[in-house]
Image (tube, rainbow, N blue to C red):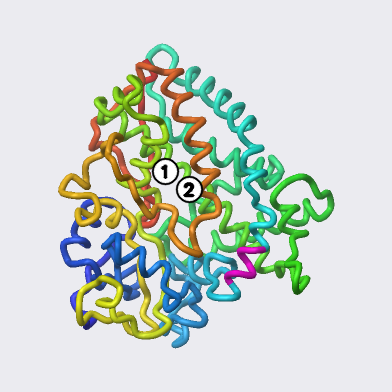
Amino acid sequence: MEFSHPMVIDPTGRDIHGEAARIRERGPVTPVELPHGVPAWAVSSAPLLKRLLTDPRVSKDARRHWQRWADGEVSPDWPLYTWVAVQNMFTAYGTEHKRLRTLVSKAFTARRTAALRPRIQEITAALLDRVAKAGADGLEVDLREEFCYPLPIQVMGELLGLPEELGAELRVVVDGVFHTSADAAEVADVYARFYAVLGELVAAKRAAPGDDLTSALISAHEEESGTRLSEQELLDTLMLMISAGHETTVNLLDNAVHALLTHPAQLAHVREGRASWDDVIEETLRAEAPVASLPLRYAVEDLPLGELGGPDGAVIRKGDAILAAYAAAGRDPRQHGPDAAVFDVTRASKDHLAFGYGVHHCLGAPLGRLEARVALPALFDRFPGLTLAEPAGGLAPVDSFISHGHRSLPVLTG
């Protein structure tokens, strides 16, 4: 399998599903070109991607297993640099990944997630009051700005014990991480500002520890060796949890709302008891994956794809980069049938890879689902006449081929 005639990925993400369909049309594995001409193999077959995500011959450690990194061809001005350069469990491999995930798991427990439910309910109620005020007298409301965006960032602030004065700056830098068409100056600025915010957060928690995730990560240690997260690992772990934990939930919420408002028969299924809010959440994660394409993984050795259920004779070579095309895989007809592109909350199988799979399955998935379980029914109960204020096709996506959401979600509260 030669790397030739790659499909150029649009860094602005203007047509996520159109691009995903074109990736699928080229086969289960196809060469693509990322920003700055960086080559990768996009995997759009759901069964094949699932196997690759669990194969020990596939790594997330660029320093050890990406030939382009070893050759010095990846510079800090690359828009995706943060996604591959950070030192945390997201980019770790093998025993190093196990060490880091164990340390983080000690701090980010199911108990800590469940304990957030009352606070999520309070934040949701307060934000719905804000939406009602903004939409008074029939005014149009940007639901992403007023509800879908602030809910996860406030929950993340509660989880991390974030000082209120850092909230505004945090929002700016998180948005910057997902700006995949940024120029070199913007990339450098976001990188520096993000570390500055995280440094302030860690300093505040060292001075006054609390019952929050940041304090728990500072004190977490691995029992057998007694090791802790290094300072860089601590900062990069916080970066991972803030970026991934926030953006995915924002997109889950506004994609679910948009899907229901553009498919009123599906909303009726929920209101009339033929489907649950969990059905809405899982079908949204499948059909409207919050993360459209996740960079990057790397072949530790040559990968004969025929052995993994892929095309016979095709091989991803050692040191090549792999792009997990989640938006394409979520609508894979081989997995979900000829109507795979249809949003259907009554679908029998809603299997998806939106939170990853295997050892790198997202630790924050239970929290994202919890926020959606609280927020979505509360929103539609409060505003039963909620409608889109613009045509379904009139919404602009966020400026990213990674993040699958909308810049705005204009609605009328009714």
Q: Which residue is mark 2?
A: 247
Residue at the (64%, 57%) spot, across then down: 105
**Amino acid type, residue under disc 2 in the picture:** Glu
| Residue 118, percent from left and from top | 63, 30
SS state under label 1? helix
Q: Which residue is mark 1?
A: 251
| Residue 200, percent from left and from top | 72, 54
Residue at the (26%, 25%) spot, across then down: 264
Q: Is residue 50 above or below residue 369?
A: below
Viewer-closest of 22 and 137: 22
Chain part drawn in magenta: 97-102
Are dots 1 and 2 in contact, CB under 8 Å? yes
The residue lying furthest to the right in this view is 207
Viewer-closest of 379 and 203: 379
For residue 272: magenta? no
Q: Circle 1: is it few (<14), some (14-19), or many (20+) Cα within 10 Å?
A: many
For the N terminus, give its image quadrant.
bottom left
| Residue 249, percent from left and from top | 47, 43
Image position of 280 (left or right of 245) = left
